[in-house]
Amino acid sequence: MSIIEIKVPDIGDFSDVAVIELLVKPGDTIKAEQSLLTVESDKASMEIPSSHSGVVKELKVALGDKVSEGSLVLMLEVAGDAAEPAAAAAAPVADAPAEAAPAAAQAAPAAATGPIEVHVPDIGDFKDVAVIEVMVKVGDTIKLEQSLITVESDKASMEIPSSAAGVIKELKVKLGDKVNIGDLLAILEGSVASAASAAAPAASAAAAPAPATSAPAAAAPAQAAASVSVAAAPAHVPTATPALGLPHASPSVRKFARELGVPLSEVKGTGLKGRITDDDVQSFTRSVMSGAVQTLAAQAQAKSAGTGSNDGAGLGLIPWPKVDFAKFGPVERKELSRIKKISGANLLRNAIMIPAVTNHDDCDITDLEAFRVSTNKENEKSGVKVTMLAFLIKACVAALKKYPEFNSSLDGDALIYKQYFHIGFAADTPNGLMVPVIKDADKKGIYQISTEMGELAKKARDGKLGPAEMTGASFTISSLGGIGGRYFTPIINAPEVAILGVCRSTTEPVWDGKAFQPRLMLPLSLTWDHRVIDGAAAARFNVYLGQILGDFRRVLL
Ligand code: CAO
């Protein structure tokens, strides 16, 4: 073991830039290339990666510090003999721009008449980067250096400024496009003497990046404006007003928010200068799930679809009956919980949009239940209680492996086959139905799944599930086995394509060819999306699932 210094590597013309986020702390085990901190100039933010793997011993920077190439970031304990710390400082920054903020043309502007083409300036090592925000629209009058778009690699985001002033006649990029140096961004009608070289080098602009001073850039991103405009009366005050709206967040936070479907423009940033952090995204999601907050999109959706106020007109149906129930007897009106409102809108969409069919079947779990009961007896002292649902999860994983279309999602005319097995399970909570997810169930044993399920179900009931614990399922099981019932028709949790419903097992007489035998039979209800799966495949899935639950040794065949 030895301790080495990790320094800021070559970050192009970024110098004296403010540390706006610390992504590691003493005691953390980090990998080479893992991001350590985020720095920000007035036009771009960038994550600084580590050049080595090891354990963080001491942080040498704090929030708000200014750093440049060579600044000491932290002391790292690494395995083996001391790697050359000097080399660490020179480690190249993966995906970070060798040049910093894009050009703000310094050249003396030349008088411009007629259309002016604005191209992507030299943005260093940024190549094929995605446009994640378009901050202007046709008809806007823009100033020299006003930001037009934001691009993002997996490590940094950057605003691209205009090399000229004028009125935007045509926009040549849209959200999601990939851009490179020299690509045409917009055509301006030059009203101001301003045209500068589109290829103005980044260096000139970046020579003195102002520390991350101001509020977010002034132009409202198209996305934020759109999401703000959908709802007339927000249930909470979105952080970003349409006029000021660029949410400030690092690329990794943006990525995290995108994965969860969190509208960043509605998240309140608690980081330095109002920056949105991972924690902010998480607590926003928690508030939505607990019902304390409703996203603007959900409000709009609930308004038009989810809460009984829907009159069906949008679907061409006859209006929802409006009845004064008080005419028939005493009544009490109670608002639906927020979770019910949100899940109601989702359930309605899934019920209407998915051509769903349910296959019912029974399977013999006599031996499995006997094994479960005896295992639990043996483990009485250790306290780990093995549940039938844990066996069902494992059996479903085996069936999903054999019939992979059940572990897929529709994407237009294509199917996305997932090579992971994250199984959601419906949990009944005082606030409504929640679906925690057992990640990588294929890699976990029955004990681990049972334990995790118990913990997740408890968190769900206590309203403490984190967003990461409720997302990413590739298949869902809804078990009413602890309650009762025979069969039901669960609604698919889109964008998944199937869901297994399970009811209470009962001992029944089963004919073995010679006599009726008392067998413990488990009722299964598999709902599937007929666009992806057909009836024969569904029947085979259920039969195979039944065979495994009947004898788990089949998993080995
Ligand atoms: N047949 C017979 N008994 C069963 C059974 C089955 N299929 N499944 C569970 N049981 C038994 C358990 O063994 C347990 O009995 P013991 O205490 O004697 O061991 C008892 O029923 C209670 O089980 P449980 O429901 O607490 O635990 P679980 O692991 O089966 O389920 C959870 C956990 C979180 C899925 C469940 O508590 C729950 O919330 N279920 C409701 C899901 C739901 O609402 N689905 C509908 C969605 S559509 O609106």
Image: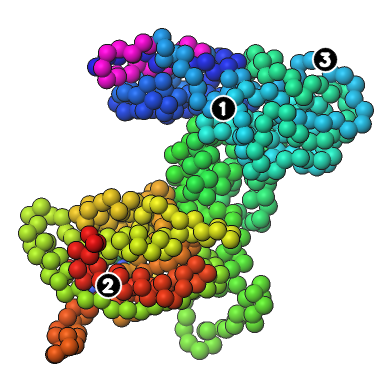
Q: Amino acid at mark 3?
A: Ala
Left-right relation of 132 to 199: left
Q: Amino acid at mark 2?
A: Gly
Image location of residue 525, percent across then percent down: 36, 75
Helix, strand or loop at label 1? It is: strand
Q: Of 511 and 146, which appears nearest the observer?
A: 511
- As drawn, the label of residue 546 is 2
**Residue beneath disc 1:** 45
Image location of residue 216, percent across then percent down: 63, 32
435 above or below 326? above
Q: Mark 1 or mark 3, which is nearer the start of the sequence?
A: 1
Residue range (magenta)? 69-85
**Residue at the spot 13% in from the left edge and 55% down from the top edge:** 383
**Quarter of the image where ligand 1 sits:** bottom left
Q: Is residue 76 magenta?
A: yes
Helix, strand or loop at label 3? It is: loop
- As drawn, the label of residue 108 is 3
